[in-house]
Image: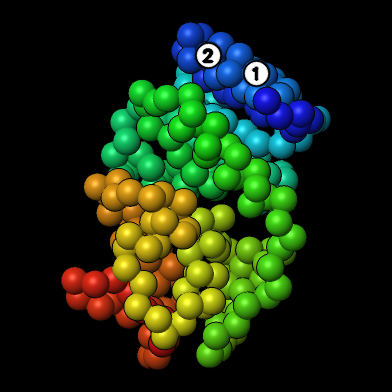
């Protein structure tokens, strides 16, 4: 067992899942703050910032999506947010990530899977932010999570920032969808979703569409490259 003072906020309207997660995390040394609806969870985080948020994507009242968006607006992207979703469709996953979530877990799940996602997210959040990155005329600000190209500045979600950073760090390399899932989403398996393609489209809309020179290119049947 670990001796860890980090606090996990869990917002989940199914009482059996809420208690199951809370007990399991406490057994591993985490402190937990539990809520059965988003409204109460929001009142809590307005005054106290936990180490990580674990949110059911669909709850009565304030949903996990709305709570995540409000939390990001108030605190930025330093604190990890993981979404719990029962549907597991690409649309559901993308909605959560676009709201500012760092990761997702599909119900039904095993506790060890949730624990692994939490450990991974907390490990990343403990890393000192990388220096600002640049490639060609594109610049990333690691503090504000903004991309600057020419005279245009755009905001990036946490996952958009991580994906674009990865492209810059591996420019002129061929990056397969499986590699991107593994290194950006921390997934060691094919999720059978097109979430990578969706996010590549998002960042293209933000940093490529208005410029004659495109930076992100599709390599048909293989993946993507930045050049």
**Which residue sits at x=57%, y=23%?**
11
Label 1: which residue? 27
193 versus 29 height, above or below: below
Locate residue 198 relative to residue 33 in the image: left or right: left
Q: Nearer the viewer, mark 2 or mark 1?
A: 1
Q: Could you tell me if residue 153 is visible in this image? A: no
Q: Nearer the viewer, residue 198 or 73?
A: 198
Q: Position of residue 31 (x, y in %)?
A: 73, 23
Q: Residue at x 40, y 26 (%)?
A: 109
Q: Secondary structure at mark 2?
A: helix
Q: Which mark is residue 56?
A: none
The residue lying furthest to the left in this view is: 221
The quadrant of the image that shows the N terminus is top right
Q: Residues within 10 Å of mark 2 (few under 14, many from 20)?
A: few
Where's residue 28, x and y in %? 65, 24
Q: Earlier in the sequence, mark 2 or mark 1?
A: 2
Image point (38%, 32%), residue name: 106
Which residue occupies the foreground of this view, 121 or 37?
121
Q: Residue at x 29, y 50 (%)?
A: 190
* Corner quadrant of residue 156: bottom right
Residue carrying label 2:
20
Secondary structure state at the residue bearing disc 1: helix
Q: Position of residue 135 (x, y in %)?
A: 55, 85
Seen in the image, is 37 located left or right of residue 28? left
Q: How is the structure coloured here?
A: rainbow
Q: Nearer the viewer, residue 53 or 214?
A: 53
Instruction: Look at the image and tell me whether residue 203 can be seen.
Output: yes
**Outermost top residue:** 16
Vertical order, 145 against 140 (above or below): above
């Amino acid at each position: 067992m670990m001796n860890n003072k980090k606090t996990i906020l869990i917002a989940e309207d199914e009482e059996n899942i809420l208690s199951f997660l809370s007990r399991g995390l406490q057994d591993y040394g985490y402190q937990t703050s539990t809520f059965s609806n988003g409204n109460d969870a929001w009142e809590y985080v307005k005054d106290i910032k936990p180490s990580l948020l674990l949110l059911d994507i669909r709850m009565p009242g304030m949903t996990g999506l709305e709570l995540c968006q409000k939390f990001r607006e108030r605190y930025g992207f330093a604190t990890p947010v993981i979404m719990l979703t029962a549907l597991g469709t690409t649309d559901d996953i993308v909605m959560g990530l676009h709201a500012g979530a760092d990761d997702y877990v599909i119900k039904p799940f095993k506790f060890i899977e949730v624990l692994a996602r939490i450990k991974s997210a907390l490990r990343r959040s403990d890393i000192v932010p990388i220096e600002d990155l640049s490639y060609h005329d594109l610049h990333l600000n690691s503090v504000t999570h903004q991309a600057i190209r020419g005279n245009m500045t755009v905001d990036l979600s946490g996952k958009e920032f991580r994906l674009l950073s990865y492209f810059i760090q591996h420019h002129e390399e061929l990056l397969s969808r499986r590699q991107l899932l593994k290194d950006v989403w921390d997934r060691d398996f094919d999720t059978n979703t097109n979430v990578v393609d969706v996010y590549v489209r998002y960042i293209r809309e933000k940093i490529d569409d208005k410029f004659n020179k495109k930076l992100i290119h599709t390599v048909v049947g293989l993946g993507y490259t930045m050049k």
